[in-house]
Amino acid sequence: WTRKEYQFRVKLFGARHPRTEKCKASLRALLGDDEEIICDSDHALRQELSEADRYSESNVDPGEISWDTDPFAMEEKWSVESVMRMFSETGVTETYGIPRLTLAKLVVTAKAGYVASNSFHNWRHAWSVTMTSFIMIQSPSVTKYLGPRERLAVLVATLCHDITHPGVNSDFLIKTADPMALKFPTPNCLELHHLDLTMQMLAPGCETDILVNCGDVERSYIVSLIRDLILATDMGQHKSIVADLTALAGPGGLLDTDPESVSDATRREFLKGIVHASDLSGQALPPAIACQFGKRVLEEFHTQHEREVRENLVESAFMKDLHLPLAQAKTQLGFLHYVAGPLWAAISTLFPDFTTQYQNILNRAHEIDFDNIANWGALHGGLVAMNRRRNSGSSGSSSLLRDRSVSLAESPTFHRMRSLDCDDIVSRSRSDEVRSRSDRTRSDGASLSIASADSFGSRNQDFAGMSLDRPCLGSQVGELKGDGSPSLASLPLHPALGE
């Protein structure tokens, strides 16, 4: 069973996710050291790494890497080789003597680390962000301020900035006490997780260490810069990054400074802006690509909100009701006006080469017509709300389920069960099972007091200390969080719920 669980977690979270690693440790304890634990993805990665010499940047024409390159149409092999070409074109491969095989293994390992089942945070997104940062640091208005160290750090940071992303944000991980949040107990636990994995791949002696020929001073600077750039993808730094870019574009800023005399601290500031802008570049791309990325973001947000409702977590306001066209348009317009717009406005002011990308963002905003949302190109028509909460002012035991609509997305009786409250479930439960566990029968069969709750279930649990003013429905009816509270799982279920 543990082996099956491990295989399932690899498919669901990826091999490097803390939940997967914890399960793998349990399996190792059961098997001992005699048997090697290998999952399907491990087999695939090992096979691909053993054939890493088949990848060559010479197979990619630099002209193929442009703003118009569609990440959703590229082949897997070409995607790896094109990233290798980006490293080659910036000159860092030659400057630091990066072995071609080592670089190929780094890119292949990073690619394998992205969860393919994620709607948005997958390899396509990572490749697009890396491509955007490559074009930006190679542009005339930026490249004059950079050396090979900065170029290498930007490419590595963007390549690995979302590795093993679970498809939910840091807030969700914290609310669910996810192992990732427990390992990095900070608001930006996701970014720290991505950074941790990146540092593992660049560790001395690792087969993916492309800094193998760097001196200690160079390695220290590059690693430090990679750290700051990955952490700059945290949305918590958005306002400060925009403010820094705006200041650099003002009088006495970067534009008034000789490129040769720009300090490392100043370079670090605007490079954080470039990486952050690359991460939020989906809507700065051509219309068809921007619409595709927009739909995928909405889908991932919607999926997270469904989980929040199902698990009775505090809901993320900007992710609510995304199955409705109006909510989709408002969310996208808010992102364009208040997030991507100001960021790319500051970038285009500081580096005029990217005025077109800023104009693309403005165009995406102008395309949203609230009087004609049905014809909006970025509208996602495939989102369905399976888990909804209903507002109610009632309290007490009867409101336990009334305040939280039953979540049974997979049940054919889902819509009928949405109308059931706690009284319904108890009064319509299997009376013979109830009577077999208690001699305190009820004539009305409509209400259940806490005093008689211990008459249900096979374990006669004590519910006296249970608080009814907090949500206690998990992904299954009657399931409580692992906070020491008693479980309602032993209550007899309504026949429509099944076993």
Image: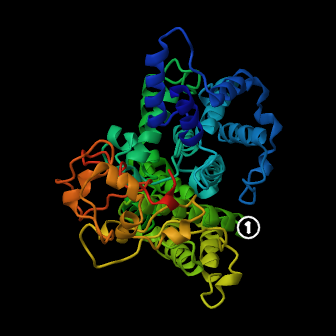
> Residue 454, percent across and down?
24, 51
> Residue 305, percent across and down?
47, 63
At 24% from the left and 63% from the top, the residue drawn is 468
- Indicate the quadrant where residue 458 lies: top left
Nearer to us in this view, 174 or 438 = 438
469 lies above or below 29: below
Residue 480 in view, yes or no: no
User: Residue lying furthest top in this view?
Assistant: 34
Left or right of residue 290: residue 17: left
Residue 19 in view, yes or no: yes
User: Residue lying furthest bottom in this view?
Assistant: 371
* Amino acid type at image mark 1: Ala
> Residue 208, percent across and down?
58, 26
Nearer to us in this view, 205 or 396 = 396
> In the rendered image, which residue does mark 1 sit on?
288
Nearer to us in this view, 99 or 7 = 7
Left or right of residue 58: residue 43: left
